[in-house]
Image: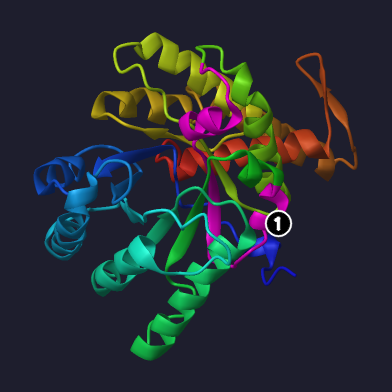
Amino acid sequence: MADKDFTDSLRPELLRRSVLFVPGDSLRKINKATELAADSLILDLEDGVAFNRKAEARRTVVEALGTLDFGRRERLVRLNPFSTLAPVQLEGLPAEDLSVTLEARPAGYVIPKVETPEHIRLVSDYLDRVEAERGWPSNSIRLLAMIETARGVLNIGQIAQASRRLEALVLGAEDLANDLGARRTRAGWEVFYARSAIVTAAAAFGLQAIDMVFVDLNDLPGLEEECRFARQLGFAGKTAIHPRQIEVINRLFAPSPEEIEQAMRLVQAFAAHQAAGAGAFELDGKMVDLPVMRAAESVLAKARAAGLLN
């Protein structure tokens, strides 16, 4: 059973257009990332850190969170994954990651390779206890779930309802393709089902959907094309693995000037027709009704959040 009121779960003002992974064991790279235009920074304790540097990475993340000015950037920490052994328990690397880094109080945690709701609930219950013990506001530390396995995709609806803390579903396409036995391609059709499933579950339960990384660092036109398609599918943003990707991602996941202008015209026309007692009406040769109006309002809300509209 879900313990979440999905009507108010998403914080619409919190942009996650660009979500940049930063190795947690490099204070230099974290410091540099605090000067970038990324909306969110994921200080990585998992894939970006060698196994023999996990402890050093935790200490570095604590130091960074306690001493660096992140400005408006969301400060997230990616944990190491749960063991694949049953029953699922919060132990080993992810437990150590939490116990050490919580003292620095990040804005949230990214849980990798989430396969069942229990992965979310175990972390959420742990945070419940810590917040109560330390007098922190309830649910003040948010969670993002990475979907990177076939099992995770199949359980996506249950995962999306696992905790009030959960705010976003993030696609990890490289691990997913490996789990599927698929070969990653530029077109990405091998993970299209997963992309659609994640967007659908996120929309159903008031979460954000964050798209997969684009691994070719030198192909910015290709990144732009993939961003356009991801936004068309319904993703709110995209993970990044290099600073040079941020400008493209931010631009493509924000409304264009043309989209903002058209949305403003729709809102004004809708208000005028409502005042005149009219329902649906025609504008520029297209029918406008309430769903179209709501889409226009969404565009304007995103534009305001991105600082593109007062």
Q: Residue at x 37, y 56 (%)?
A: 79
Residue that badge 1 annotates: 158
Whether residue 42 is situated above or below residue 61 in the rendered picture = above
**Residue 22 position (above or below residue 181):** below
Residue name at image x 48 percent, y 34 percent: 175
Occupied quadrant, residue 203: top right
- The answer to whether residue 144 is left or right of residue 195 is left
Q: Depth check: give the residue in front, 273 or 267.
A: 267
Return the x and y of residue 19 as percentages of the image width and height: 38, 40
Q: Which residues, given as a range, are shown in magenta?
A: 155-184
Residue 73 in percent (x, y) is at: 30, 50
Using the image, determine if residue 237 lies above or below residue 92: above
Rendered residue at 13%/62% (across/down):
63
Q: From the viewer's perspective, is residue 96 above or below residue 78?
A: below
In the image, taking residue 275 as reference, residue 246 lies left or right, namely left
Please state the horizontal and vertical placement of residue 35, each as a whole percent of the image.
17, 41
Q: Residue furthest front?
A: 85
Image quadrant where one finds the C terminus: top left
Give the amino acid type for the residue marked by disc 1 in the picture: Gln
